[in-house]
Image (tube, helix red, strand yellow):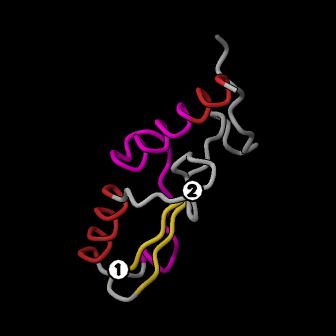
Amino acid sequence: MQEEQDRKSRIRSLNDTLRETMLIGRVVLTQGVMSLDAFRRAEIMQKVRTFSDFTYDNDPHQEHDFGAFMADGIRISGRSTITTRRADFCRPIPPIPR
């Protein structure tokens, strides 16, 4: 049980770091978001960085890997997926050995 909680805590920390800093991992935007002007994209990205409204409904696994909000009448949703460095295989990262 503790091992599972530690794993979730590590995943949540990685997802929070990616969302808040966008310095680790890869950020991909949809064509819809990319079609917006730079100002609106910047507003959306700021909302992503500061998103913290995680509830059981949108984060049942408590990993902070999904978020959704409204921006100028547009529903924006995002998902974090942790993969190995060879993302072309999209394999989840194995548990961290202790």
Looking at the rendered image, the quarter that the C terminus falls into is top right
In terms of depth relative to the viewer, which is nearer, 84 or 57? 57
Name the front one of labels 2 and 1: 2
What is the number of callouts on the image? 2
- In the image, residue 49 above or below residue 97: below
> Is residue 28 covered in magenta?
yes
**Tag 2, which secondary structure?**
loop
The residue pinned by badge 1 equals: 71
Few, some or many residues within 10 Å of mark 1 (<14, 14–19, 20+)? few
Q: The residue under label 2 is which amino acid type?
A: Asp
The residue pinned by badge 2 equals: 59
Image-based side of 35 in relation to 30, left or right: left
Q: CA distance from mark 2 to mark 1?
A: 20 Å
Residue 1 x/y as whole percent: 70, 27
- Give the magenta range: 9-34
In terms of depth relative to the viewer, which is nearer, 93 or 86? 93
Q: Main secondary structure of the magenta part?
A: helix
Residue 80 x/y as whole percent: 55, 52
- In the image, residue 24 above or below residue 43: above
Q: Residue at point 37% right, 56% down?
A: 52
Residue 64 x/y as whole percent: 51, 50
